[in-house]
Amino acid sequence: MDSSTNRHPARVRRSVLTVPADNPRALAKLASLACDAVIYDLEDAVAPENKAAARAALVAHLDALSPDRHAGLDRHMGKDPVERIVRINALSAREQGPANLGLADLEAVLPFAPDAILLPKVENPGDVQQVADHLEEADVPATVRLWAMIETPRGLLNVAAIAAAGRTSGGRLDCLVPGLNDLAKATGVLPQPGRPYLVPYLMQVLLAARAFGLDAIDAVFNTISDGAGFAEECRQARAMGFDGKMLIHPAQIAPANAAFGIDPADLARARAIIAAFAEPDQAGKGVIRLDGEMVELLHLAQAERLVARAAHLAARDGTTI
């Protein structure tokens, strides 16, 4: 199968809330929130002196969610509405002091089978492969996936190679997330409304994701009090093709869910495309005519993905679209 269509199972990732693992109030509140995914952050959101305490707090939180330590496997069968991702500290030697914080993070959370491990500051394919190899050697189920943060100039230059290598057999990579705060700082780009000088960075990540069948989540919006600005940035990200947005506050969940939601008209069109290609007289055709328009196999692939996302959302929430 061509790598551009070799996608992971469809997930709905409109709203991806990041929560510091050492914030007990935030952890306790998660059960009442309507985000599609949560990132438990052990990296940037945790001060160096609090790393061990944050790890212990996260272990306690995950243990309370799955006391038998097998509920993590059940989540992959659609029994948990929230996708759970853990952002570990880097395993790379360039980020480490005497203790390998990233390895300690992995060993602590893997018994709970989180949906994914988010790797920070990924700069080359080896950063992803190192963790993938570790998971294979530890016999971690393939349902535990990998996400990659692209937040350095070197990582951005290598993003296509990272995406390609991460989608090889056993690679586990499902999603790319640009870290615009770090990229802006490293490149000297000043923050401006509309992100005019950062959009090329975003599109480079998105293009790499789409070339190799990955999801792409837009970067955080820093000004929590600016609801209008956040909504506009969500609309921009949706127009650029992103699957969802990384969030830093619960107030951002509802606008993100609305902006990246599934439009009923788009879903109806997708179902019509699938039905048209399934007609016996269309068998084997690469291009067909539907409602006066030419529809190609690439449109069929897009339609199937949208319908799969809608089905996942309906099964998860017990709703229909």
Image (cartoon, rainbow, N blue to C red):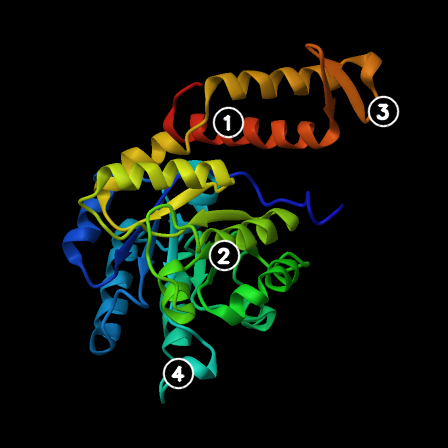
Which of the marked residues, 1 or 3, is nearer the chain's N terminus? 3
Q: CA distance from mark 3 to mark 2?
A: 39 Å
Q: Residue at x 46, y 22 (%)?
A: 263
* Residue pointed to by mark 4: 96
Residue 34 showing in the rendered view: no
Q: Residue at x 23, y 47 (%)?
A: 249
Q: Nearer the viewer, mark 4 or mark 1?
A: 4
Q: Is label 4 in a helix, a strand or a loop?
A: loop
Q: Residue at x 67, y 59 (%)?
A: 168
* Residue pointed to by mark 1: 311
> Tag 3: Cα neighbours inside 10 Å, few (<14), some, or many (≥20)?
few
> Tag 2: Cα neighbours inside 10 Å, few (<14), some, or many (≥20)?
some
Specify the label residue 201 is tagged with: 2
Going by the numbered disc 1, the residue's amino acid type is Ala
Front residue (pair 98, 17): 17
Q: Is label 2 in a helix, a strand or a loop?
A: helix
* Residue pointed to by mark 3: 284
Q: Residue furthest bottom?
A: 98
Does residue 39 lie above or below 294 as drawn?
A: below
